[in-house]
Structures are given as structure tokens and as C-alpha cells.
């Protein structure tokens, strides 16, 4: 990919501008990117290096020594081995994966239906669209808090369900039962981020040229047929972006899980982030946590870069 | 039935469904707002009744947040006064500072990428990679580093991290804005005698003013909403509002009313801002890939 | 093939009247051009015929059946858009096949018919290409093929050739005309180019500001314009207009050296006189010439030369053979073919003769 970029660069710059200008431009470019790269270096690269370093030791702050002396407790890859073979760790990864898939799928389906709904006119549509944004803007910490209250066993959600459910008394143990706790976490994420999917998908639908829709209509295509053959194929890149970005963020879920149930009961709603947090701050096993963190980072990077490749290819051909 | 009538009925149906969805979506927000205005008696779940609409509107919860005690405030006992002001202050300063830092580094990076394809083709992706790491993973070494540098529990420490974390958004967003400006504009400025940097400053930058404002506001919301980073990197001295909210407890127990009031305050700011920048929200949340 | 009738069709957008009480009867199998300047309402009328828009009032009939409430997809019309509206994510083949896929035609049949259409339009080797790899000319052919393949009763084309190269435009016009004759298809063709309309259509409906100005054959529209707008709009070289007065059996202009032209059957009063450049001829300046003037500008156009003549405050054009080699400043006499004079009422613009 880098090779292709280089050739394009030369072709782009050389014929159009005088050579010293082009060189000055490139120099400026490098300078302009520098502060950002510095930021990256200090605040990202360095911590990661340190983390790798720590992960290869069995250092812990309670041991009393400073962190840069951690090499005294060198242990090579035992932390990694412990992590990979830890049932708890693997289960958490699986659980986080389940949460991500469930939440993102629901957000996608609901977002799509809503986008289709909002594609055509109806009164007050503009106003409604603005209000639909609100859940996204609610600080995640706050939504965790609010849902904590809402999902109490004797709270409003159960009260409403009791009204609707034939037979009266609904008392779902949202935050107490392991399965329901997991569902609660998914629910909060879906509530918070469906509007995002909705917005993205709506802009995708509206981007389909009206002329083509009309042409297909005149050829006899029903709305449904046009959706299948025109709208969705044209939306593929956008759909991909939305899914990837949302999945990335969902995998890192912390706020809601922590505030609703602290990851509980037991470990029922513990996501990766919650697990790492707990191990780090409640059990002080920092070198072990470092190893786990590295594993997670590598895994996500690999998966995401795989998923993004078709996207980057799409961007190149522009 | 004529086509017109069918269209009418469909439109009304859409309207009704949209209302229903909106009601469900906004119910938690509604609940939060009413909670903030309810006196203690009305929301304690143990009474067995749920008060859907506050019967006794009170601003006691709000005033409580700022140290003033009042009867009817939703506290279990009349207990120690709380002061939410410092935490709100900290949130504000850290968010604004972080935003400025991210903008400083991000805008020039974005321009470098957009105009000069600096950093090769890989830089944009590397920056995206930043967002792939679970924050908790990166936070721990930062914690050590910060402690070592004595930046723990300081606003500057927080600002630096916020800047770094939202830097990717600035780059991707501003890049998409810069991409929309034709190269000819900078080139014309150079022909007129500007240095490349001067061309950037005088010719291109003014053109993306709108995008810049949007990006700044968007990033501000992100910083304002942060929970985990502040949770780890702050203590009594620089607690931000979200953390303060989650830990709002006094001798009397968890202060739901005050929490709700603080929640309302916390949320109002992003909501107001998002209404202003709503046109570009999609662009921001998809890293500039989707332009409405 | 279907007969189209528009009865009292009006389309309003808020207070703006785009089409005003439009009345038209298009016989089965004919080629009709909807001609008019931008914004005259011709595209809106097309949209109403196709079903993309509904009339505010009035009825539209296909073969005697009221189709106001029939949705666009069920009207059995073909529509070729000005900017083709090709499906950008589908190959040329898939574009053409689209209508058949909607009708769930089986694959073998689809293949056969797409190839047939492609052969007819001479785009067979391009079928597997994507739209972004096709030239503008080929894209338009694909668009036509896409509409043709479902064999609609009525074919609507909205300025389909305005984006094509000039040379190709003439070629496509001929092809389209041949196609229409062969398929005996009812075709309605929207254009703002009067040359196009004149050369292709059997009947022309001229519109301006939402109203039908005249409906007739090219010859009728050219030789017997119903009003001043039509007279001015139609014809490669514009008609000349003069203020004139009718009195005592003749008509005279306020032009130096012009003599009254005998005229009967017209009420006395002020009128506008119109005459086309080709019905004026230049002769040596003499007292017997009806009008006099001098050459102001010479425009050689190849087969003809246009002389811009000035007479006092009046300027007008005369079309003459290229062999008449007159120079600027020369004095000339102008002969008038009295049979070809058109008179227009000053207030209404309607032709009086």
C-alpha cells in the first residue's frame, strides 16, 4: 500500500509545481505532522513499550520497588501463558465478543429500520431527528447511572412492563440475575448508540441519487425491490464503516458495565475493560494485567486491520 | 383507494411510529430529568409506587449540589453538604484544554496528510489504530508514568491525555474538511508569494473555519463525556464531574437526587452543542468517512 | 403504442404554476416533441405523463383509460433521463436487464433479449463494462436500451441528447427516428433546441410559462405561427419584427424610405409585423423597392449569407445566397414577399394573419 502511495505522490506533485516548491511543500508537510507524531510517541508508543516491558516481569507495586527496576522480577512469557490459558480471561473475551455482536447487530437492525422510516416525509420530521440524537449525547457515565435506577427490580421499567404484560406483575431481576445483567449491558449500549447507526444509515439512504430511484421505479420496481437492488448495494461502504467503528467502540465497553453492575453478579457482565480494571486496581496484579492488555491490543489490531482493508482499498480508488 | 390517499395514510403511519420510537428512546432522559426535580419522598422505590410525574416540583436537588441544604432534598438524612462545583470546573477545564491540545496537534497533522500526503499512506491508519486499544490497556502504564512525573491527579496530566485520546478524531475530521478544499487555492497563494505555511494560514485555514468549529465542539463533547480516564488518573484534587457523580455518597447513603441533578447538568451541555453541530455529527462519528 | 390525452392538466408548486391548463391529444404511434425554453414546464409535463408527479388538477388518459392514480411503475412507459440515471454499481448488461429482472424473467430469456437490444444499439462489446468505463455516448445508449427492453407502450425522453458531442447528436437523432418508425412507438421528446424538434418530430407542442402555445406539424409551426412567441422561437435565423400600422388597406412601417404594402382583411390599428429573413430579398437600391437600407454586418454561413441591414433606427436581417457579394455600408433595396408576412396583435401576441 505504501508503494502505491509513493508513486501517486510523485505523479501528483512533480508536473504541477516547480521543484523547489514541491520540496518546500514536502518539508512543511513533515513539519506539520511532527507535533502529532510526537504526541503519539510520548503518549502512546512509550506507554505501550513500558507495558510490554512490565508484562515480561512479575512486578507489582506492592512489592515496594520502582517500576523501572522491574527487570529484577523478570519472568519472560509466563504472564502471557497464564493469560492465554486462563479460563476467566478467555471467557471474558468471549463474553465481550457476544456483547459486541449482539449490541451492534441490534443497533444495526433498529438503526436501519429507523433510517427507512425517516427516509420519507412526515410531519415534524426535522424536530424528531434532532431529538433522536439525544441518547448519543448522554454522557455514558450518566446513562449508566440512569439505567441503574431504571432497571432496579422495583423500578420504572418493571412497572411499565407490568402494565403492559397480561397478568400484571413483572419483576425481572435486571441487575441481579447473571443472564439479565448481560442483557442489561447490551440494552444500555443499544439505547445509547442506535441513534448513531440511524444517522449513518439515513445519510447513506439519502445519498442514493433520486434519478436512479426514479428510473428504477418507472421500470416497475417496487420500493422493496429498489431497496434490495439499489439502496443497499450503494450503501455497502457506509454500512461497513458503521459496523467496524461501532464494533471497535463496543468492544471497549466500560462505563455502562461498571456503573450498572460492577461487572457482576460475579462475572456475568464483565467486559474486557472491566476485567482489566478490576485486576489492576482491585488485585494489583499489574504485570499480569499488562500482559493481558497486550494480548487484547494485538488481537483487536489484527482483526480491525483485516476488516478495514476493503475500506482502504475503496478510498484509494477515489 | 387513490394513490394520494395511500400516501397520506402511509405518512401518518410513519409519524405515529416515529412518535412511539421517540417516546421509548427519550424515556430514560425524561426519567432522569424528573428525578432531578423530585423531592426525596417521591422516588424512593420502597414506597411501592412510582411517581411518573413529580408532584412536588423542587429544585432542592440542584441547590444541594452546590452546598445549600434545603428541606425536601432527596437525601436520606440531612447529611453533610456536598459541593459539585469543583468537579464541574475540573471537567470544564480539562475538556477545553484537551480540546485545544488535540486541535493544535491535529489540525496541522490533518493538513500535512491532506495536502502533502505526509507520513506515507500508513499514517492515517496508524492514527485510527489508536482508537482500537481498550483505554484501560493504555491507561495503566500512563498511570505509572504520570505518578513518576508527578502528573497524577493534576489537571495538566488530564489535559495531556484528553488531547492524545481525541487527537485521532481531529485528524480524521479535519482531514475530510481539508480534502474538500481544492489544491489550487494553496497553490494560488504560493504563486502570490506566500510560503507554504503562509498559504496554509492565510488561504486555506479561513475556509475551514466552520469545520474547525464543528470539530472543536465535537471533541469537547468527547472529552466532557470521559469517565474511565478520569477515574484512573484523578483523585480528590481533580475529580471530574462524571466520576464525582458516580461516587456521590454521603453518610446518608447514595444521593440519588443530587446525582440526578448533576446528571441533568452534565448532559445539557453536550445536547445543546450537538444541536448546533448536528449537520456534521455523522462525519465526526465515522472519522470523516461519511459526509452528509 | 398508445394514444395520450391530457385534459386541463395543471401543476402548481405552492403558488407557482408550472403547468397551466395543458391540453393535448397525441395519436397512437406518433413522434411528438415538447419544445420550449428552460422553465416552460415541459419537464414537469413529462413527469406527470410518466407518473413521477401527479397533476394538481386535470386528467391524463392512455388509450382512453384514466391513469391519474396509476403509479409510475405500472403505467407501461419508458423514460430516458437527461443525465441517463444509469445504475452506477451495475454493469451495462445488468442495467439493461434491470426491467426484466423486476418482472422475474428467466435468465435465458434475459440473456437473449439483452443481446438483441445491445446489437440493435451497437453496444454489444460493452455489455460487461461498468458505467464508469463507458463514454457519455454509450451511456445514453445503455439508458435507451434499458427503457426499450421492456417494450413500453409509450416512450418518454427528457432532453436525452443534450449532453452528447455535437456530431454524435445528429447521428443519434437519426437513429432514434428510425427506431421509432420501426417500432411504431408513441414517443414524446422534450427539448429546448428547436432544430432538434423540427428535424425529428411529426408534431411539435410548443410551451412557454406553463402554457401550450401551439401544437402542429413542423411546417405549420414554422409557416403559420400562432403567436409571436412561437414565431420568434422557431427558425434557425430569428424572424424580424417591426412595429407597423394598418390603415386604408395597406400596412406601413416607420422606417425611412419604406413604402406601404397593400393589405386587405385586417382591422386598422397598430400591429407587429413579422417576416423571416429568407422571405426578404436584396436588390439594387431604387425607388421601386419597398424598403431601403444599408448593409451593417455580413455573416457568411456557408450555404447562405445573413446580411444585417440598417434603415434609420431599424435593424433587421436578410438571408441571401452567398454569391451576392455585398459589402458593409452598401445601400440596398429590400423586397418583401407579401404572402409571408405575419401580423401579431400588440397586446396579445396572437397572429392576426
Image (tube, coloured by chain):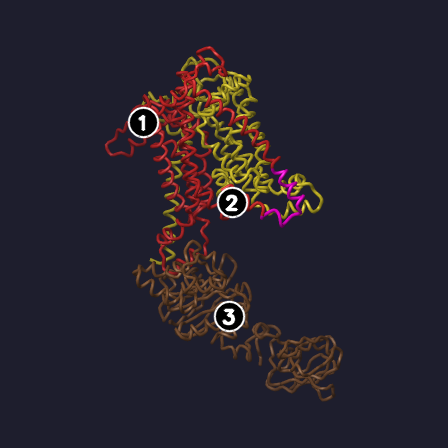
Gap in angstroms between the C-alphas marked 2 and 3? 59 Å
Left or right: where C173 falls relative to C105: right
Which residue: 53% across, 43% down?
A5
Left or right: where A95 falls relative to C23: left
Labels in figure, total: 3
Tag 1 secondary structure: loop
Disc number for residue A174? 1
Disc number for residue A4? 2
**Taking B160 as reference, is C216 above or below it?**
below
Is C101 one of the magenta-colored residues?
no
Which residue: 55% across, 46% down?
A7
Taking depth in this image into account, of C105 and B278 the one nearest to the observer is: C105
**Taking A179 as reference, is C129 above or below it?**
below
Of all chains in the rendering, the one displayed in brown is C
The residue singled out by tag 3 in the image is C212
* Residue B144 pos. (x, y %): 50, 18
Of all chains in the rendering, the one displayed in yellow is B
Q: Could you tell me if residue B60 is visible in this image?
A: no
Q: Over which residues does the magenta segment extend?
A: A11-29
Pointer 3: residues within 10 angstroms few (<14), some, or many (20+)? many
Q: Chain of mark 1?
A: A
- Nearer the camera: disc 3 or disc 1: 1
* Residue A278 pos. (x, y %): 39, 20
Of all chains in the rendering, the one displayed in red is A
Tag 3 secondary structure: strand
Q: Chain of mark 3?
A: C
Tag 2 secondary structure: helix
Gap in angstroms between the C-alphas marked 1 and 2? 53 Å
Amino acid at each position: 500500500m505504501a508503494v502505491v502511495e509513493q508513486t501517486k505522490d510523485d505523479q501528483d506533485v512533480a508536473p504541477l509545481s516547480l521543484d523547489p516548491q514541491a520540496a518546500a511543500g514536502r518539508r512543511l508537510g513533515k513539519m506539520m505532522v511532527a507535533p502529532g507524531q510526537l504526541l503519539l510517541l510520548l503518549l502512546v508508543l512509550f506507554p505501550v513499550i513500558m507495558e510490554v516491558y512490565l508484562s515480561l516481569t512479575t512486578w507489582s507495586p506492592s512489592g515496594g520497588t520502582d517500576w523501572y527496576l522491574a527487570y529484577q522480577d523478570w519472568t519472560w512469557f509466563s504472564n502471557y501463558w497464564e493469560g492465554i490459558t486462563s479460563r476467566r480471561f478467555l471467557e471474558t473475551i468471549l463474553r465481550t465478543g457476544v456483547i459486541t455482536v449482539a449490541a451492534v447487530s441490534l443497533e444495526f437492525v433498529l438503526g436501519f429500520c429507523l433510517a427507512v422510516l425517516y427516509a420519507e416525509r412526515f410531519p415534524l420530521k426535522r424536530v424528531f431527528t434532532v431529538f433522536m440524537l439525544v441518547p448519543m449525547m448522554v454522557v455514558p457515565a450518566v446513562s449508566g447511572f440512569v439505567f441503574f435506577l431504571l432497571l432496579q427490580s422495583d423500578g420504572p421499567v418493571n412497572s411499565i412492563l407490568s402494565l403492559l404484560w397480561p397478568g400484571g406483575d413483572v419483576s425481572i431481576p435486571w441487575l441481579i440475575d447473571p443472564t439479565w445483567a448481560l442483557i442489561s449491558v447490551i440494552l444500555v449500549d443499544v439505547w445509547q448508540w442506535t441513534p448513531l447507526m440511524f444517522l449513518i444509515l439515513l445519510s447513506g439512504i439519502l445519498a442514493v441519487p433520486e434519478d436512479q430511484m426514479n428510473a428504477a421505479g418507472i421500470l416497475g420496481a417496487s420500493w422493496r425491490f429498489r431497496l434490495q437492488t439499489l439502496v443497499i448495494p450503494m450503501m455497502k461502504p457506509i454500512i461497513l464503516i458503521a459496523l467496524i467503528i461501532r464494533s471497535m467502540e463496543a468492544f471497549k465497553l466500560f462505563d455502562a458495565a461498571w456503573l450498572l453492575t460492577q461487572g457482576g453478579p460475579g462475572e456475568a457482565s464483565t467486559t474486557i475493560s472491566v476485567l482489566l480494571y478490576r485486576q489492576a486496581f482491585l488485585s494489583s496484579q499489574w504485570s499480569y494485567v499488562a500482559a493481558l492488555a497486550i494480548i487484547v491490543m494485538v488481537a483487536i489490531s489484527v482483526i480491525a486491520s483485516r476488516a478495514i482493508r476493503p475500506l482502504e482499498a475503496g478510498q484509494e480508488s477515489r | 383507494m387513490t394513490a394520494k390517499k395511500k400516501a397520506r395514510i402511509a405518512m401518518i403511519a410513519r409519524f405515529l411510529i416515529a412518535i412511539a420510537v421517540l417516546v421509548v428512546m427519550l424515556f430514560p432522559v425524561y426519567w432522569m430529568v424528573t428525578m432531578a426535580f423530585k423531592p426525596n419522598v417521591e422516588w424512593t422505590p420502597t414506597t411501592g409506587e412510582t411517581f411518573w410525574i413529580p408532584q412536588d416540583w423542587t429544585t432542592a436537588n440542584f441547590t444541594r449540589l452546590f452546598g445549600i441544604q434545603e428541606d425536601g432534598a432527596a437525601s436520606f438524612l440531612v447529611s453533610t453538604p456536598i459541593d459539585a462545583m469543583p468537579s464541574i470546573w475540573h471537567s470544564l477545564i480539562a475538556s477545553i484544554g484537551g480540546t485545544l491540545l488535540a486541535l493544535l496537534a491535529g489540525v496541522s497533522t490533518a493538513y500535512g496528510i491532506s495536502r502533502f500526503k505526509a507520513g506515507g499512506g500508513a499514517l492515517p491508519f496508524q492514527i485510527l489504530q489508536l482508537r482500537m486499544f481498550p483505554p484501560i490497556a493504555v491507561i495503566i502504564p500512563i498511570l505509572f508514568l504520570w505518578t513518576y512525573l508527578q502528573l497524577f491527579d493534576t489537571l495538566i496530566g488530564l489535559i495531556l491525555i484528553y488531547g492524545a485520546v481525541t487527537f485521532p478524531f481531529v485528524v480524521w475530521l479535519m482531514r475530510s474538511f481539508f480534502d474538500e478544499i481544492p489544491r489550487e487555492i494553496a497553490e494560488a497563494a504560493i504563486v502570490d508569494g506566500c510560503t507554504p505555511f503562509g498559504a496554509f494560514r492565510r488561504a486555506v485555514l479561513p475556509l475551514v473555519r466552520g469545520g474547525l468549529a464543528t470539530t472543536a465542539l465535537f471533541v469537547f463533547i468527547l472529552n466532557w463525556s470521559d469517565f474511565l480516564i478520569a477515574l484512573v488518573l484523578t483523585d480528590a484534587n481533580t475529580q471530574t464531574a462524571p466520576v464525582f457523580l458516580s461516587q456521590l455518597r454521603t453518610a446518608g447513603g447514595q444521593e440519588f437526587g443530587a446525582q440526578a441533578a448533576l446528571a441533568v447538568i452534565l448532559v445539557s451541555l453536550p445536547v445543546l452543542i450537538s444541536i448546533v453541530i448536528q449537520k456534521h455529527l455523522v462525519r465526526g462519528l465515522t472519522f470523516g468517512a461519511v459526509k452528509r | 403504442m398508445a394514444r395520450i390525452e391530457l385534459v386541463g392538466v395543471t401543476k402548481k408548486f405552492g403558488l407557482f404554476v408550472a403547468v397551466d391548463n395543458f391540453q393535448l391529444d397525441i395519436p397512437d404511434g406518433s413522434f411528438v416533441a415538447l419544445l420550449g425554453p428552460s422553465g416552460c414546464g415541459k419537464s414537469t409535463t413529462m413527469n406527470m405523463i410518466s407518473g413521477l408527479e401527479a397533476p394538481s388538477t386535470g386528467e391524463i388518459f392512455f388509450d382512453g383509460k384514466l391513469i391519474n392514480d396509476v403509479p409510475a411503475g405500472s403505467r407501461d412507459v419508458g423514460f430516458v433521463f437527461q443525465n441517463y440515471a444509469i445504475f452506477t454499481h451495475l454493469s451495462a448488461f445488468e442495467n439493461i436487464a434491470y426491467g426484466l429482472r423486476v418482472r422475474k424473467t428467466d435468465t435465458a430469456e434475459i440473456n437473449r433479449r439483452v443481446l438483441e437490444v445491445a446489437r440493435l444499439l451497437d453496444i454489444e462489446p460493452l455489455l460487461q463494462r461498468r458505467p464508469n468505463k463507458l463514454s457519455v455516448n454509450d451511456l445514453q445508449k445503455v439508458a435507451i436500451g434499458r427503457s426499450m427492453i421492456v417494450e413500453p407502450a409509450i416512450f418518454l425522453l427528457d432532453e436525452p441528447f443534450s449532453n452528447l458531442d455535437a456530431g454524435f447528436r445528429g447521428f443519434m437523432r437519426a437513429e432514434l427516428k428510425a427506431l421509432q418508425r420501426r417500432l411504431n412507438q408513441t414517443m414524446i421528446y422534450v427539448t429546448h433546441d428547436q432544430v432538434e424538434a423540427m428535424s425529428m418530430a411529426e408534431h411539435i407542442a410548443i410551451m412557454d410559462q406553463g402554457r401550450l402555445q401551439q401544437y402542429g406539424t413542423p411546417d405549420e409551426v414554422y409557416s403559420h405561427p400562432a403567436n409571436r412567441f412561437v414565431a420568434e422561437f422557431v427558425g434557425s435565423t430569428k424572424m424580424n419584427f417591426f412595429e407597423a400600422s394598418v390603415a386604408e388597406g395597406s400596412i406601413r412601417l416607420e422606417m425611412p424610405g419604406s413604402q406601404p404594402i397593400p393589405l386587405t382583411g385586417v382591422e386598422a390599428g397598430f400591429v407587429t409585423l413579422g417576416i423571416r429573413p429568407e422571405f426578404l430579398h436584396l436588390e439594387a437600391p431604387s425607388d421601386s423597392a419597398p424598403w431601403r437600407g444599408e448593409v451593417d454586418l455580413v455573416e457568411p454561413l456557408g450555404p447562405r449569407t445573413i446580411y444585417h441591414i440598417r434603415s434609420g433606427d431599424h435593424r433587421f436581417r436578410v438571408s441571401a445566397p452567398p454569391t451576392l457579394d455585398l459589402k458593409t455600408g452598401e445601400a440596398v433595396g429590400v423586397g418583401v414577399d407579401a404572402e409571408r408576412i405575419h401580423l401579431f396583435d400588440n397586446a396579445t401576441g396572437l397572429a392576426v394573419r
